[in-house]
Image (tube, rainbow, N blue to C red):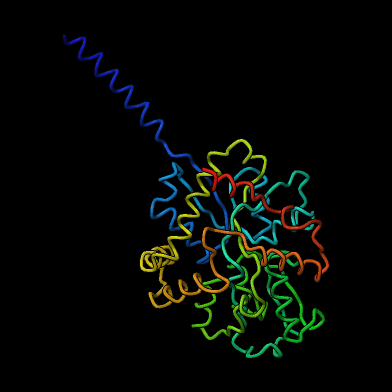
């Protein structure tokens, strides 16, 4: 009888161990830029949307688009959040680094151009920027063309300013603070934090220019082909989390404050308002067709015409699979 009990216990232990193994979440590595537009991903982590889909997702912050693309192409990450324009540039071979096998494709949208044009305290108007320096992530991709067009609409041409490439949001903030540059495009909360220090917010980029396809969720085609389950799981979680931000202000603000140490509640509420307003996050994490056209048109204006239309840089078949499930 004792032997039977031991065998039964052993069998039960093996069954339980097998069940625990089956429930182990799949690790997914994602890399993006800093800022409050990461809120949907933070919500998916903190509110269990990723866990519900059987995923354990990490989100690292990149030093810039060049480093981000190098890391994802080296296999260090499965997913990225990045400016749609970066995918266009690197797909067409116009990025800071060339890849023979570059196959990153956009599968979901994050926002429609939610950024601020921020200038040093001594800059009060666009006219004050003549002869000054712009800080951008990369000269020919990212949000640089958005800034160039806003300045053009305000009467400034590329002959009126200099450009330096400094990488991510943190790099642009540093360039403004130490005086290497006088203007940059920044996301929240960095724009609000600089405004409190006396820096000037010249414009809301979306208000100044209209919708553009800002950040997107993207994945390598080669990896996605063999990991359909993981891609669809992440997409479901992201869509649910992005909609959660719209529908649950207090909970979203709570996550934003947790993930942004020192952020005042009033500022967090203002950021939430911007995130859910014009140019902000898109419901269902949808890509913005009008915004995609804007990005492609601006590349033509600033010397790097896209080598195709929207479908070259995104894969909507994944959204169709989500809808069919």
Q: Is residue 22 above or below residue 137?
A: above
Residue found at the very far left of the displayed protein: 1
- Name the residue rendered at 79%, 60% in the picture: 306
- Name the residue rendered at 41%, 36% in the picture: 24
Residue 204's x, y, as percent?
Answer: 59, 79
Residue found at the very far front of the displayed protein: 324
Which quarter of the figure has residue 95?
bottom right
- Name the residue rendered at 83%, 67% in the picture: 303
Total number of numbered discs in the rendering: 0
- Name the residue rendered at 62%, 75% in the picture: 206
Q: Is residue 53 above or below residue 120?
A: above
Whether residue 264 sits left or right of residue 186 in the image: it is left
Residue 10's x, y, as percent?
Answer: 28, 18
Task: Compare residues 188 and 199 and report the one nearer the observer.
Answer: 188
Residue 12's x, y, as percent?
Answer: 28, 21
Whether residue 224 sits left or right of residue 15 in the image: it is right
Task: Compare residues 119 and 281 and report the one nearer the observer.
Answer: 281
Q: Is residue 75 above or below residue 85?
A: above
Which quarter of the figure has residue 223?
top right
Q: Quadrant of the N terminus?
A: top left
Whether residue 288 sits left or right of residue 156 in the image: it is left
Task: Compare residues 236 and 91 and report the one nearer the observer.
Answer: 236
Which quarter of the figure has residue 68?
bottom right
Whether residue 262 sits left or right of residue 110 in the image: it is left
Residue 111's x, y, as percent?
Answer: 57, 65
Task: Compare residues 73 and 232 and report the one nearer the observer.
Answer: 232
């Amino acid at each position: 009888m004792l032997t039977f009990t031991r065998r039964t216990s052993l069998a039960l232990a093996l069954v339980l161990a097998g069940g625990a193994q089956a429930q182990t979440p799949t690790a997914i590595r994602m890399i993006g830029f800093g800022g409050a537009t990461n809120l949907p991903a933070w919500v998916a982590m903190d509110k269990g949307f990723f866990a519900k889909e059987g995923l354990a997702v990490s989100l690292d912050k990149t030093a810039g688009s060049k480093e981000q693309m190098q890391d994802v192409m080296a296999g260090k990450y499965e997913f990225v959040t990045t400016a749609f324009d970066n995918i266009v540039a690197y797909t067409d071979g116009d990025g800071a680094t060339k890849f023979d096998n570059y196959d990153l494709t956009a599968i979901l949208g994050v926002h429609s151009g939610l950024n601020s044009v921020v200038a040093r305290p001594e800059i009060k108007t666009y006219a004050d920027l003549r002869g000054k320096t712009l800080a951008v992530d990369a000269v020919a991709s990212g949000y640089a063309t958005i800034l160039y067009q806003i300045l053009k609409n305000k009467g400034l041409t590329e002959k009126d300013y200099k450009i330096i490439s400094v990488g991510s949001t943190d790099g642009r903030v540093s360039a403004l603070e130490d005086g290497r540059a006088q203007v940059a495009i920044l996301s929240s909360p960095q724009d609000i934090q600089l405004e409190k220090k006396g820096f000037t917010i010249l414009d809301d980029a979306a208000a100044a220019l209209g919708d553009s396809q800002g950040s997107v969720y993207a994945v390598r085609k080669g990896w996605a082909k063999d990991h359909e389950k993981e891609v669809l799981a992440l997409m479901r979680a992201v869509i649910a989390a992005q909609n959660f931000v719209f529908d649950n202000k207090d909970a979203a603000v709570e996550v934003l404050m947790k993930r942004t140490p020192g952020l005042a509640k009033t500022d967090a509420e203002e950021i939430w308002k911007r995130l859910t307003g014009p140019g902000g996050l898109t419901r269902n994490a949808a890509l913005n067709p009008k915004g995609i056209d804007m990005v492609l048109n601006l590349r033509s204006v600033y010397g790097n015409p896209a080598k195709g239309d929207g479908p070259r840089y995104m894969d909507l078949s994944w959204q169709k699979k989500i809808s069919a499930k």
